[in-house]
Image (spheres, rainbow, N blue to C red):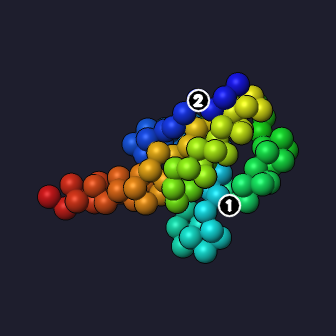
Amino acid sequence: METKGYITASDLFSLLAARDKIIILDIRRKQAYDEYHLSGAVHIDADGALDYLEGASESTEIPVIVVSDLDEPASTLSGDIGYKGYNSFYLKGGMEEGWFKLVRHIRIHEQK
């Protein structure tokens, strides 16, 4: 099974708001993770992601969201995870062009 593709920031926001069971793997630099990370995210080195999932996941059907600064490293890891049978996605646009862009958009509209 290959990666299921990407998830948009707004779709991820909806999953988080609904408190759906998901696993978020944040593969950014530790400093970036420490400065800000998504609620429930686990900071992990990309090389250790599969080992982590094998020990943590109750089911390969639980969505695994890979978060990075850029699409490429996250999409590659998501593909590897999907190949192992997990329901995997990567955050399209990463944190900067995906998540933070959504947050800025929400804040602008809240101020109006």
Left or right of 76, for residue 57: right
Q: State whether residue 83 appears in this view.
A: yes
The label nearer to you, 1 versus 2, is 2
Up-down: is 30 above or below 90?
Answer: below
The residue tagged 2 is 4
Rendered residue at 63%/32% (across/down): 3
Q: Say what secondary structure mark 1 lies in.
A: strand
> Where is residue 66 shown, x and y percent of the image?
61, 47
Q: Is residue 69 above or below residue 78?
A: below
Asked which quadrant contains residue 87, the reply is top right
> Which residue type does callout 1 highlight?
His
Q: Which mark is residue 43?
A: 1
Give amino acid for label 2: Lys
- Which of the pair 96/34 is nearer the observer? 96
Q: Residues within 10 Å of mark 2 (few under 14, many from 20)?
A: some
Q: Is residue 14 visible?
A: no
